[in-house]
Amino acid sequence: MPKKKQIKKHKHDKFLIIIGAILIFITVLGAGLITWGNNILVPEGQKEKEQISSTYRGTLTPAFSIDLSKPFDVSVGTITYGFTAQELSSGIDLVDKVIHIENVTLPIQITFENNIIHVNATITDSNGQIIGKIRDNDWWSANSEYNPSIWDRNYNSYAFELKDENDLPVLQVLMGQQNKIEIGFTLLAQGIPYYFGLNGTKLGVTHDDYATIHSSTLFKYPSTDCLGELKNSEGYPVNNVFASANEKIATGNILSTTGTILTIVFGFSFGGLCFEELRKRRNKEE
């Protein structure tokens, strides 16, 4: 073979090797993206969603920072009270300053420390068994599978609600507006049910009142279908409890789709290149 043809063939082979290497690299990259998307990110996102849906613990975080130059409103039921930062710093005793029921200690206390509102509450059922509590904004609720007194619970980052077996909201905490906290609860004291809800206050609750109280829930239900969804979200920030998990799933699907396209396009291109080169060499041999 003449030297010029040898040089030309050598350059051609070198070019094919480079192109082939690039195609192989992109194909392998595509396969890697598929694996990363389908086998890592999507399962992680799905697992995270399952954990969020089944959790019975969380932390309340006010949606806005506190403006110390303005009064801080505490709404219990439909009654709103204004407090200064100094009053907050010593703690709000709902029994003495907001609601008074003789010989009854209400289950909720609010304190203010380091510019942060802290909520503490303990809710029990008619048998005195604890079904939900909040300690310095960390909340916990009993699992309805193990405690028949609990029907459901719902939450987002700045709100929490607990419902009992009668479908009544026994505890509601909402911190979705600046310098304001809204509280609702149902309390059984001395055999008398007291309801302090966000839509009204009722002393001596009867079954006739259940329909009205049911309608005062903060969230949509059941939580399995409407986790984190407020019934009335107007005036409150959007808070999707599945945002992080959905982002992982979406990213995983995008990576998987991109990887599939790369693998198919460049994998076939590499195969086609090899086939064409093999055909040319066979023709020359013949």
Image (cartoon, rainbow, N blue to C red):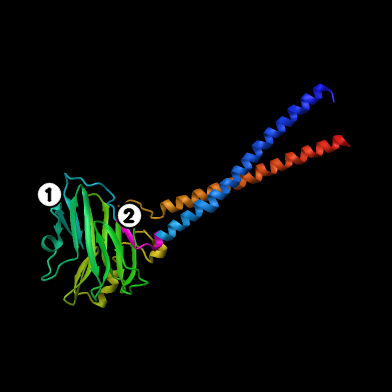
**Picture quadrant where residue 187 is located:** bottom left
What label does residue 157 carry, if any? 2
Query: Image point 62% across, 43% down: which residue?
Result: 28
Percent of width and height locating residue 126: 24, 75
- Residue in front for this viewpoint, 18 or 231: 18
**In the rendered structure, does residue 238 fall within the stretch colored magenta?**
no
**Picture quadrant where residue 148 is located:** bottom left
Q: In this rendering, is residue 126 above or below 139?
A: below
What is the crowding at mark 1: few (fewer than 14 residues within 10 Å), some, or many (at least 20)? few
Q: In this rendering, is residue 197 above or below 178?
A: below
Percent of width and height locating residue 185: 23, 66
Q: State the extent of the magenta-drawn residues as a range.
A: 52-59
| Residue 275 horizontal side relative to residue 254, left or right | right
| Residue 99 horizontal side relative to residue 178, left or right | left
| Res. 3 in view | yes
Which comes before the other along the chain, label 2 or label 1? 1
Numbered disc 2: secondary structure: loop
Percent of width and height locating residue 170: 26, 68
Query: Image point 26% across, 77% down: which residue?
Result: 207
**In the rendered structure, does residue 54 fall within the stretch colored magenta?**
yes
- Residue in front for this viewpoint, 47 or 197: 47
Q: Amino acid at mark 1?
A: Gln
Query: Image point 65% across, 46% down: which residue?
Result: 264
- Residue in front for this viewpoint, 10 or 80: 10
Percent of width and height locating residue 98: 13, 61
Report the residue marked by disc 1.
86
